[in-house]
Amino acid sequence: MTWRTRSLLSPFVVFALLFALYSAILLGAYRSGYYEYHDLALISGFFQNGIHRGLPFWVSETQINHFSVHFTPTLLLLFPFYWLHDSSATFLVLTSAALAWAGAVLWVWMRGLQKSGWKKPALIALWLAFVTSNIWKSGLMSVHYEIFHIPFSLLCLYWYSEGHRL
């Protein structure tokens, strides 16, 4: 295995480890009844109304379409996953995947900073502090679709820091 292969493999390993960790946390909380509050039920209802009643993004409690309040393109991207597995846990697994992807992007970014002179232990400590911070954990546990903007935002910031233009 060459250095280049290892450098390409490590983000996938980081993603897999974070995905397993975050999925265990979220699904464990889900099974213990932690998410018996409004947001997860409301968001799952958007998708289930679309699949079973032909009313995508319909809010049963208020009898309005969510898109009539505000347009959320993220919901359009998530809808096909509910066709594959119609469960509230689907959203939790997708949340885990989004944050694990963001952690992998951060890992690649930190490796780039190492090449520019940063010390490896400092970067690993910084990365661990970020992916276990209260901001990250509150995003993980909030179960809301805005969480899916984090990986895309980090990827854009990473590309910009590397000199790419969007």
Image (spheres, helix red, strand yellow):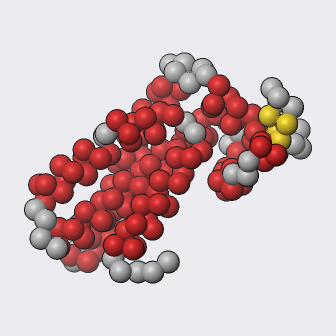
Please give the name of the residue rendered at 41% of the width and 55% of the height, measured from the top-left corner: 102
Where is residue 145? Give x, y as percent: 59, 45
Where is residue 112? Give x, y as percent: 24, 70
Residue furthest to the right in view is: 54
Where is residue 116? Give x, y as percent: 17, 73
Nearest the viewer among 113 and 107 is 113
- The answer to whether one can see residue 79 in this image is no
Residue furthest to the front in view is: 69
Nearest the viewer among 96 and 16 is 96
Please give the name of the residue rendered at 52% of the width and 46% of the height, measured from the top-left corner: 147
In the image: residue 36, left or right of residue 166: right
Where is residue 48? Give x, y as percent: 77, 37
- Residue 43, compared with residue 17, is above or below; it is above
In the image: residue 67, left or right of residue 73: right
- The answer to whether one can see residue 123 in this image is yes
Q: Please state, as top left, top right, bottom left or bottom right, where the N terminus lies in the image.
A: bottom left
Image quadrant in which you'd find residue 35: top right
